[in-house]
Image: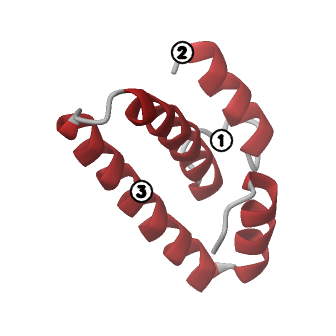
Amino acid sequence: MDTATKQDIKADFATHENDTGSVEVQVAILTARIKELTEHLKIHKKDNSTRRGLQNMVSRRRRLLNYLESRDYGRYQALIQKLGLRR
């Protein structure tokens, strides 16, 4: 993922002007990286080190979503809808 893509994601999901680390931004960036690695693994089926990294990213995203769900359910629902995640 290049820097321009990350900047676009930050601009779309930021909660305020200088927001770079809110839960929404982190989950959106992880989701984009997960989609890229999923496509990579469809081609390179035996790339187990990438598969392990993907599993770590998925679990980190799940923990962030669980945190957001427990803190602010409305923001959680809005984020799930915007990203199109099944949860």
Q: Give whichever of discs 1 and 3 has the lower sequence position.
A: 1
Q: Position of residue 57 (x, y in %)?
A: 38, 50
Q: Position of residue 50 (x, y in %)?
A: 27, 36
Residue, x 58% and y 38% (percent of image)?
Answer: 32
User: Which residue matches tag 2?
Assistant: 2
Q: Position of residue 44 (x, y in %)?
A: 33, 28
Left or right of 51 on screen, residue 2? right
Q: Position of residue 53 (x, y in %)?
A: 28, 43
Residue, x 66% and y 69% (percent of image)?
Answer: 86
Q: Which mark is residue 59?
A: none
Q: Amino acid at mark 2?
A: Asp
State the separation of the CA atoms marked 2 and 3.
Answer: 20 Å
Graded by Cα atoms within 10 Å as few (under 14), some (14 to 19) or many (20 or more), the crowding at tag 3 reads some
Q: Which mark is residue 19?
A: 1
User: Which residue matches tag 3?
Assistant: 58
**Vertical relation: 4 (above or below) 35:** above
**Vertical relation: 80 (above or below) 18:** below
- As helix, strand or loop, the secondary structure at mark 1 comes to loop
Residue, x 30% and y 53% (percent of image)?
Answer: 56
Viewer-proximal residue, 18 or 48? 48
Q: Give whichever of discs 2 and 3 has the lower sequence position.
A: 2
Graded by Cα atoms within 10 Å as few (under 14), some (14 to 19) or many (20 or more), the crowding at tag 2 reads few
